[in-house]
Image (cartoon, rainbow, N blue to C red):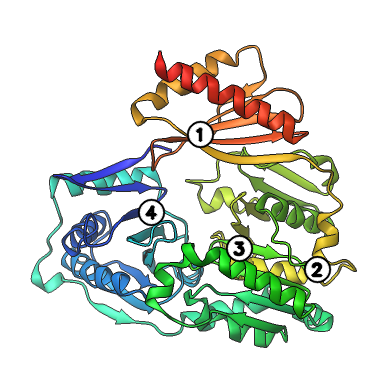
Amino acid sequence: METVIIAKKNDFLSFENGIIIGRTNVELTCEMATKLAESFGSVLPVGSTVYVSRDYHKSSRMLKRAFLGGLLSTGINVFDLKLTSPAVMCFNLARNYHIVAGVHFEQSFESHSCTQISFFTNEGLTIDISKEKAIERIFFRENFLRVNYTDIGEIHENGYLDNSYVKKFLERLNVLAIKHKKFHIAIDLLYGSAASIFPAILNELDVDSVILNAYFNDKKLTNVSNQLLKSKRELSEIIVGMKLDLGFLIYPDFKTLDIVCNNGIILERHIALLIFLELLAHEKDKKRVLLPVWAPDFIDNRFQNLRIDRSKITNLKSADLERYDFIATTSGNYVFSEFGFHFDSLFASMKLIEMLSRESKFISEIAMIFEPFYYFETKIACENRLKGKMMRKLLEDSLDKRNSNGDGIKIWMNEKNWIVIIPDQNSDTLRLYIQASTEKDGQKILKEYRKKIRHWADE
């Protein structure tokens, strides 16, 4: 994936995978938001309609309002969804043919001083690199479309998207099976906007739940990443102390999900992925699964009832994704295509509950059935100017080994031990993913490639 850098004088924003992240009121000012809107609106048909939504943070509200003005000036009509989750917006985007795109503003989880703007197609997927480049060209040239005053866009409000989302949500689950199992769970909503919709869903499913941090608080939302360890510890203690079945951390982005076992242990995300695969493999019909190239494959032989493909999972169209029943990453992101093609932590959590309703085991017992192996993710410093050289050196160095370069470079040491190296588009780093039979083997691979990368950087 190529990174598009939108720059103006000394200010810059990175534009990757349909997402822009910038420091609020520094790089990402109201002026910048308006120009981004004018650039985006200029690549859309005059008179078309888009969804625009936000979380409840005051910076998201401020920048969204500046953005709306820019869209209207290019002749684009807007459904202002106000406080709406990206999952709800994407769900409705894919089902309303007259809406051509969507934009969502939210506080960045990675950096409390930044706002994140996500751009979506009418399929509910993030825009691709060609659309990014088109927006970039217009932004740089300031060649914005300015319509006649009679064609200026209009703002409408739509307060019924949550209802359609909840209705389809429940239709896609085996509600009777969930109710019959009578789950007792704990959920931390981490001050996100899920608080406005998830409790009602849990009530419809008759899931007995302890819900934490289900209120709006700008200051808390800004510092969620710093409070995460505390939230995880408290959630674990509640689950163990109250003898609950399991728990979930629903991140504010609605994309990311962490799972806590009945014994209070927070599952590593690659193990959580394997549990999803194990439960899917118990389904009657054979399922097709799409995973990134760095997803663990150590125990693929367990999943005889699954057809697993590994490739890029970004810049795909719905026509590509509809062939799959389940799409996931190793970062706690899950898609069940029966509901939509966007990552949705709410639906993933309840789909897990549904699959568990057919089992006689706790989730901690399912985690214990996997053969132990080592899986590790990390980053290594690498200047942007050296990334091309590093990829070339890695390919040359791996000529005598099995390798692939479909997404970054993957090098096998043997059938089960490998490393994947991918240039990080948002920082001066390389991302490394290692799978090995043992921790000793994994650390040996990490040490070897750290040494090689440092040596090549000094050449």
Quarter of the image with the C terminus in it: top left
The residues tagged by marks 2 and 4 sit, at their Cα atoms, a distance apart of 34 Å
Return the residue at label 1. 422
Does residue 71 lie above or below 211 as drawn? Answer: above
| Residue 215 as seen in the image, left or right of residue 368 | left
In the shown orientation, is residue 319 left or right of residue 152?
Answer: right
Q: Name which quarter of the figure residue 424 lies in.
A: top left
Disc ID at residue 19: 4
Q: Is residue 94 visible?
A: no
Residue 133 appears at what percent x and percent y?
30, 43
Identify the disc placed on residue 184.
Answer: none
Q: Secondary structure at mark 3?
A: strand
Judge the density around disc 3: few (<14), some (14-19), many (≥20) Cα neighbours within 10 Å.
many
For badge 4, the amino acid type reads Ile
At 74% from the left edge and 67% from the top edge, which residue is drawn? 264
Q: Which one is earlier in the sequence, the residue at label 2 or at label 4? A: 4
Estimate the spatial distance between the alpha carbons at disc 4 and disc 1, rounded to whole Å: 19 Å
Give the labeled residue for mark 3: 257
Amino acid type indicated by mark 1: Ile
Which residue occupies the extreme right position in the image? 360
